[in-house]
Amino acid sequence: MALEAARTTPRIAIIGCGFAGIGMAIRLKRMGIASFTVCEAGADVGGTWRENTYPGAACDIPSHLYSFSFEPNPDWSRTFASQKEILTYLKHCVGKYELSPFIRFNTRVLSARFDDDARIWRLDVETGGRRETVQADVVIAANGALSRPALPQIPGIDRFAGKLFHSACWDHDHPLEGKRVAVIGTGASAVQFVPHIQPRVAQLLVFQRTPPWIMPRRDRAVSERAKRLFRTFPVAQRIVRCAIYCQHEARALAFVVEPKLMKRPTAFSLSYLARRIKDPALRAKLTPHYRLGCKRVLLSSDYYPALAQPNVELVTTSIREIAEDGLITEDGTHYRADAIVCGTGFQVVDAGAPFTVIGANGADLDARWRREGPEAYLGTTLADFPNFFMITGPNTGLGHNSMVYMIESHIAYISDCLRALERRGARTMDVMPGIQRAFNDRLQRSLEGTVWNTGCRSWYLLKSGKNAALWPGFTFSFRRLTRRVRAEDYRFTD
Ligand code: NAP
């Protein structure tokens, strides 16, 4: 099957229709390229913001920054928009930029294989129960790092007779009202949904493995006056966006430059905990014993108050097994539960490639990443994988600022790669192995000594301890590096 959209060269397949896929598609249209198709596994756009519908789902980066720079939304109703509002925003972008004809829904990419002779990519896709082959000159993987929910590998998990689901696959048809509910995990998702389900359930058992560092979330409604101002004077919203960006970017100083700068936020977070949790035993359980910033710092003003309610028990003994009717901890205590909600995060760095990707001369991305850990050049291109580009690939995640900013940097870089191909009249490009190696060696050196490597367990680190998730620096440095393609970094073929 050829790509459906009107065809000029090159034919481009974008995988995924979340922030990254939508942003890339808009850019291609603006470049005058109409020969692209977005393959989306789901039935709608939105990616993570379509999938994660758990109660209280919202962004912990302020909305004025967590949106495309070229498409400001003067109507954000709150400083931290809800999942629904972000999804509406993304749908608005799809509508405004007329992307619908380019999107193939319910189309899951199973594999991408580079044909060495024809020098094109063949994507094996499953669409409505049928298998097809999509041919493309360029593949842009915009499938996101956090799209594969991870259920905990706890013995007996399949035995549980009640309802069990992951926070990213919330079962809204299964009301939790009046039930005994167990929550496993206390990460970014759990601190958002726990306060929302606590008032509805009879009893809430929260199983915590590691206490998160928490800061209050200063969420408030955006006044009608402010919205009017942003509509009338868009520059005002740009100034607000810039101020939020700078405020968040300053945090990178503490993460990677001067660890002493963590002292004040650490003291503030501990005093916030003390103000919200009066019971000393509960406070002790909630006090983190690792450095602030090592895991994602969570923003919530209602999580601690929810945990202090009489129908909540915070369990910090490890779960030994799951029984038919509940959970059993290492000390033998049996906690009965009608439902278990797993806020246990996503398969990230150790999981290898999200689908089979076979590059030039049989290079197998999954095997390579499992052997060496995920690596790319600028998180975007890969040696031996011609014309294969990633958005938010390895080491481009952030602990301190908006991923949409990073996504826009990737998009600019990939656009420049396409221009470089056109300028040279080349058919393919891939980064030189030595350039990719040297880049990753430098990157890993700059991760040494950062707060993320100070001994906590986090999804940022591989089992080997290597950090393959985070960008170790300022986002503006990444933007600078991705502004222009250095042709000398690449191998071009005609
Ligand atoms: P997460 O932050 O990785 O948290 C997973 C939680 O589950 C942790 O508390 C972890 O404990 C626990 N856990 C995992 N396996 C377990 C097991 N076998 N037994 C007991 N506990 C277990 O996952 P998440 O909350 O879904 O968030 C993932 C990422 O999504 C975030 O870091 C963030 O990047 C993104 N996110 C963003 C927002 C936003 O507002 N922008 C909201 C939600 C999520 P340990 O800490 O001990 O590992």
Image: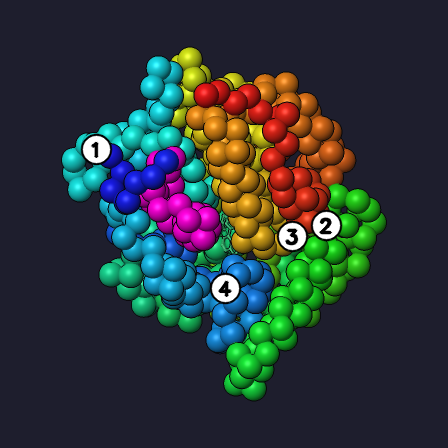
From the image, state whether disc 4 or disc 2 is nearer to you: 4
Question: Does mark 3 have its CB less than 8 Å from ligand 1?
Answer: no
Mark identifier at residue 71: 4
Mark identifier at residue 400: 3
Q: Are marks 3 and 1 in contact (CB under 8 Å)?
A: no
Vertical arrangement, residue 134 with respect to residue 34, above or below? above
Q: Are marks 1 and 4 in contact (CB under 8 Å)?
A: no
Residue type at numbered disc 3: His
Colour setup of the view: rainbow
Residue type at numbered disc 1: Met
| Numbered disc 3: secondary structure | loop
Q: Earlier in the sequence, mark 4 or mark 2?
A: 4
> What residue did someone put label 2 on?
252
Q: Earlier in the sequence, mark 3 or mark 2?
A: 2
Residue type at numbered disc 4: Glu
| Numbered disc 2: secondary structure | helix
State the extent of the magenta-drawn residues as a range. Answer: 10-38
Residue 226 inside the magenta-drawn segment: no
> What residue did someone put label 1 on?
1
Vertical arrangement, residue 198 with respect to residue 480, above or below? below
